[in-house]
Image (cartoon, coloured by chain):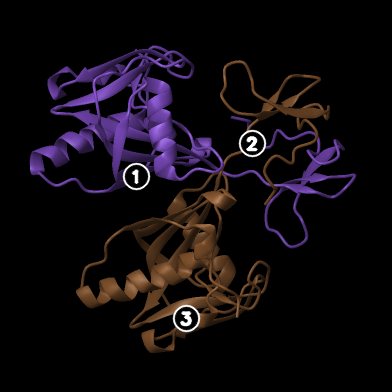
Chain colours: A brown, B purple
Amino acid sequence: MFAPRSIKHCRACGGEVRYQTPADDNRDRATCLVCTTIHYENPLNVVGTLPVWEDKVLLCRRAIEPRHGLWTVPAGFMENGETTFQGAARETLEEANARVEVGQLYALYNIPHINQVYILFRARLLDLDFSAGAETLETALFAERDIPWEKLAFATVRNTLTHYYSDRAAGDYKFHMGTIEPLARPVRT
Amino acid sequence: MFAPRSIKHCRACGGEVRYQTPADDNRDRATCLVCTTIHYENPLNVVGTLPVWEDKVLLCRRAIEPRHGLWTVPAGFMENGETTFQGAARETLEEANARVEVGQLYALYNIPHINQVYILFRARLLDLDFSAGAETLETALFAERDIPWEKLAFATVRNTLTHYYSDRAAGDYKFHMGTIEPLARPVRT
């Protein structure tokens, strides 16, 4: 959303802000030079689902940047006032007009270089009445052999699908945690 | 940290902000009336550990509000540029001057009424050279029979310790996910 260290004005009074380390802190914070309010910047959660119908998974082709035109799982920024699983269900509805029963927490990916945490749940698609939401070009169900591996939007999606098919073959869905480094990003093809 | 819906000025230009729903959105956002920048507000992650030494756990007595004087696990707001487990280790060092080996993700608590997600890891205390950090009155190791159940700071801490002793007795540490409702908060005694 907003680039880190880009705060120029105080949200409380509009005064000029400077990045400096408060007396009781150990890192620079945007500090208002007028009213002394400190503005913290923290990572954001992206919440979403891996919606499953029989032997297929539901993916969405992105209508927005980054990774316009590539495939992803339905996910987006967690909002105030909701739980992680409520946010995951809401994003699935918004991106794919799809109703799901949210299941187990399936993956947590740290993405420190962009200050995000991806939190993904397995989910059961409740009906086939899905369609592209405003930020989606198209939605489709994919069997394993049809997954567009070369056209996936994010490393988080590739990792989650890889784990899913491995776990499904083993008959044991484990929780997966990982860290996405800049070099692990897929090259856009 | 900052109360939701309390943005009065644009962080980009200092102009006046109004809460209104952008054309492509479905909820009110702080929108700058001068430069049209939209300021999103999202939940924060609190990351921490349950540090274990033999049959004891390390707790911290809080030197700050909320819940000044009550006991908690070492935890605090996740910072930009770090992973959840790096943040958990950092908070353990800051709150208790304690070095840990961070283990499995142990609990994730949604706290939607205060827009927070608690992410706690089991951890192995590496030595006994711990002490109170700046936001801590004292640190101590507790055996199960000595846990100050009536003086725990948060429902997240009570739940985590309850799960821990139950899992330990069963010999199987499971991941726990839950939602903390306002009424579930412990009454301060």
Query: Is there any visible trace of residue B159 in the rendered image?
Result: no
Give the residue at the far front of this rendering. A183
| Between A160 and B24, the one nearer to me in the picture | A160
Please name the amino acid that badge 3 sits on.
Trp
Residue at 83%, 30% in the rendered image: A14
Mark number, residue B4: 2
Residues at marks 2 and 3 touching, judged by CB atoms closer than 8 Å: no
| Between A91 and A118, the one nearer to me in the picture | A118
Q: CA distance from mark 2 to mark 3?
A: 40 Å
Check disc 2: other Cα within 10 Å, few if <14, some if 14-19, many if 20+: some
Report x, y in % for residue B161.
24, 31
Location of residue A178 with respect to A39 vertically, above or below? below
Res A68 → quadrant:
bottom right
Residues at marks 1 and 2 touching, judged by CB atoms closer than 8 Å: no
Residue at label 3?
A149
- Give the SS element for disc 1: strand
Residue at 27%, 62% in the rendered image: A174
- Give the SS element for disc 2: loop
Q: CA distance from mark 1 to mark 2?
A: 23 Å
Residue at 63%, 30% in the rendered image: B2
